Image: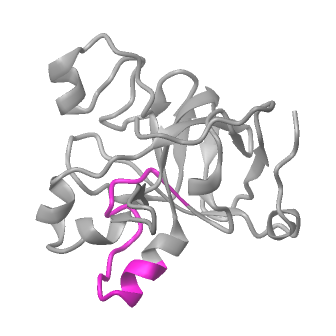
Amino acid sequence: MADAQSDEQAAGLAQVVAVSRSPVHGFSKPREASIRLLPGIGVEGDAHAGTTVKHRSRVAVDPTQPNLRQVHLIHAELHAALAAAGFDIGYGELGENITTAGIDLLALPVGTRLRIGDAQIEITGLRNPCAQIEQFREGLLSQVVVKDAHGEIVRKAGVMGVVVAGGVVRPGQGIETTLPPLPHKRLERV
């Protein structure tokens, strides 16, 4: 497997900034001192943990679908960009379990593995923000779903993954990135 560490990551700058979880289905998740990732399940004590889908809209369609959205990761750089646009949003308030810094989550291919301590997450795809985000903060959806110069939709609200190896995740821990074998598959919404 090829190592995808950038110079910044090699210098130890790719890290966990915050961790969050919520036992109830809601938009935001309160920050925690640490979270425990369970292999094949997700974040212990989080409403979205499980082997099958837990997102209400997906459960309504087919509750037996595999849960490709066990862990939600957002880059702190998105929070900074939103703040610059006038949206003061704290870590976890967009529903993410892990807030990262120093890693371009949106540029990773499907199957990328992120190692945080003993825990390992495999990236499955992009988060597809829904109308709830607009109810949370008016105008926010247009900040996290945009069109590029070619008219293609660009989703900026983070990535989703499944837990491959369990462990405790805390702010300040480094993140090691390993790309899957070539050819790489671009992230799509999951």
Residue drawn at 33 percent across, 75 percent down: 89
Quadrant containing the N terminus in the rendered view: top right
**Observer-nearest residue: 177 or 92?**
177
Residue drawn at 21 percent across, 60 percent down: 133
Task: Give residue 52's position: percent from left, percent from top.
Answer: 36, 17
Check residue 156 for magenta coloring: no
- Picture colour scheme: one colour
What secondary structure is the magenta-colored segment mainly? loop
Residue drawn at 34 percent across, 47 percent down: 128
Task: Give residue 152's position: percent from left, percent from top.
Answer: 41, 56
What's the magenta region? Answer: 80-99
Does residue 188 appear to the left or right of 169 in the view shown?
left
Task: Give residue 181's position: percent from left, percent from top.
Answer: 80, 30
- Report which quarter residue 103 is drawn in: bottom right
Task: Give residue 86's position: percent from left, percent from top.
Answer: 30, 88
Residue drawn at 45 percent across, 69 percent down: 149
